[in-house]
Image (spheres, grey):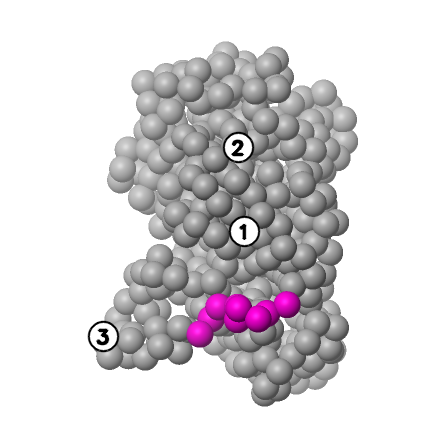
């Protein structure tokens, strides 16, 4: 079996699964946010149940419109707060401890290799970077899972992506997934598990792996997944949930996760191979993540705004890369630079390391963790005719504001360099 089939099998009791089978599988964690959870709560309450299936396996993260941008956002957040109190939900994260959900939950150790995770948010596929099967569901499916502790799935086919070679300078995980989406299209992996492998993947740190799996949905993928290795285990070991484990207990965990890899005889619907050494930084142009061009082909794209952050590239390594480029420099006159760390922990790290000061002295804005402008929510909506470059995951028509605006996507290094020049710029131009 593939790693995806193994994980699903372990959550059903079936010894063997094949693509196309319908299964009812146990879930290890369920996720809702301030957009999707209120509807799930409404549906759950209709069931008349006195308790949820497991109060420790539900996470509620109001991250899209908080701090509340208006009365509607405030009411949605209150709905989550009241539900968490009523059912004693342990993993409810309010202002001051919350972060962008797909960075926060792994950071806390709430997702581990081999887990089955569902979330009423399409980018739940992020957790595949840990060797988990994680996927987005609708709000009513989320409500059902709160009652049953289970969810229905059709076992997906898997596409194996093999990446060879070594990355050039300024090229990383974000560029890898953009190049891949450009190759197969936004529907190239529809309802398939995207399994990322090869020496280039092994070379990447966890932050880059999260970026890759996060954007599997932009190719239509049911999930993205990377087999866990020593880097994965080291990341999990240092999370609050696991760092207090004894060495004996930790070794038992590692042993349980040791078989989380696809068998050599596993069957795939397709195998794609790439040489990353041939790539330069990639830019997704309006209005699709698949409309990708190498940065060398974009000479004079002037910008009104640059956004560094989101569940795709708002982690500490992303901020370090951007700050290293911006140190001692100024943002172009007339351009808005908005930097959003993905969690409170990252926010504090950025302050302690002096990164926040670099962004502010450069003329940028360093804000509280939030999805913010990524979905055209707040903290940086763009208006008609404006052009933005963002490290976010989507650039659909009107995604960041007005339908007559334009959004380009890039890695953090390109975003930082471009904020200095006021146009899409290769980092080598400013370093």
User: Judging from the image, what secondary structure is the residue with disc 1 in?
Assistant: strand
Q: Which mark is residue 247?
A: 3
Q: Is residue 328 visible?
A: yes
Q: Quadrant of the C terminus?
A: top left
Q: Which mark is residue 162?
A: 1
Q: Are marks 2 and 3 in contact (CB under 8 Å)?
A: no
Q: Nearer the viewer, mark 2 or mark 3?
A: 2
Query: Tag 3 or tag 1, which sits nearer the N-term?
Result: 1
Q: Position of residue 333 (x, y in %)?
A: 50, 12
Query: Tag 1 or tag 2, which sits nearer the N-term?
Result: 1
Q: Quadrant of residue 355?
A: top left
Residue visible at 76% across and 31% down in the picture? 403
Looking at the picture, tell me which residue is in the foreground, 287 or 257: 257
User: Judging from the image, what secondary structure is the residue with disc 3 in?
Assistant: helix
Residue visible at 54% across and 64% down in the picture? 60
Q: Which mark is residue 279?
A: 2
Q: Quadrant of residue 372?
A: top right
**What's the magenta bit mostly, secondary-structure-wise?**
loop
Q: Quadrant of the N terminus?
A: bottom right
Mark 2 to mark 1 CA distance (whole Å): 15 Å
Q: Compared to 144, does 123 lie above or below? A: above
């Amino acid at each position: 079996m593939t790693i995806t089939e193994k994980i699903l099998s372990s959550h059903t009791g079936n010894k063997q699964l094949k693509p196309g089978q319908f299964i009812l599988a146990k879930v290890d964690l369920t996720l809702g946010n301030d957009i999707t959870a209120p509807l799930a709560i409404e549906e759950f309450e209709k069931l008349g149940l006195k308790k949820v299936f497991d109060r420790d396996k539900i996470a509620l993260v109001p991250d899209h419109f908080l701090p509340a941008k208006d009365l509607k956002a405030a009411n949605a957040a209150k709905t989550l707060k009241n539900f968490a109190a009523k059912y004693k939900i342990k993993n409810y994260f309010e202002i001051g401890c919350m972060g962008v959900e797909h960075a926060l939950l792994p950071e806390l150790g709430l997702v581990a290799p081999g887990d089955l995770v569902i979330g009423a948010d399409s980018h739940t596929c992020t957790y595949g970077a840990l060797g988990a099967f994680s996927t987005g569901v609708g709000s009513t499916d989320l409500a059902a899972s709160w009652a049953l502790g289970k969810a229905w799935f059709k076992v997906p086919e898997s596409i194996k992506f093999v990446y060879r070679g070594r990355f050039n300078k300024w090229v990383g995980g974000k560029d890898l997934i953009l190049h891949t989406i450009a190759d197969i299209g936004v529907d190239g992996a529809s309802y398939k598990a995207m399994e990322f492998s090869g020496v280039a993947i092994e070379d990447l740190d966890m932050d880059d792996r999260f970026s890759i799996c996060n954007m599997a949905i932009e190719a239509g993928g049911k999930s993205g997944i990377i087999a866990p290795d020593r880097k994965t285990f080291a990341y999990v070991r240092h999370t609050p949930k696991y760092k207090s484990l004894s060495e004996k207990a930790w070794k038992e965990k590692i042993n349980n996760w040791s078989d989380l890899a696809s068998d050599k005889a596993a069957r795939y619907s397709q195998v794609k191979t790439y040489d990353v050494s041939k790539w330069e930084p990639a830019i997704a142009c309006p209005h699709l993540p698949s409309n990708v061009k190498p940065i060398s082909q974009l000479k004079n794209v002037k910008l009104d705004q640059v956004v560094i952050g989101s569940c795709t590239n708002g982690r500490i390594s992303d901020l370090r890369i951007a700050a290293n480029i911006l140190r001692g420099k100024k943002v172009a006159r007339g351009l808005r630079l908005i930097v959003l760390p993905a969690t409170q922990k990252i926010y504090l790290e950025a302050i302690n390391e002096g990164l926040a000061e670099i962004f502010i002295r450069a003329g940028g804005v360093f804000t509280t963790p939030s999805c913010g402008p990524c979905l055209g929510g707040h903290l940086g909506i763009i208006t008609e005719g404006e052009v933005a470059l963002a490290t976010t995951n989507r650039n659909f028509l009107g995604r960041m504001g007005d339908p007559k605006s334009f959004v380009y996507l890039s890695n953090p290094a390109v975003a930082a360099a471009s904020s200095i020049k006021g146009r899409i710029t290769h980092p080598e131009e400013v370093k």
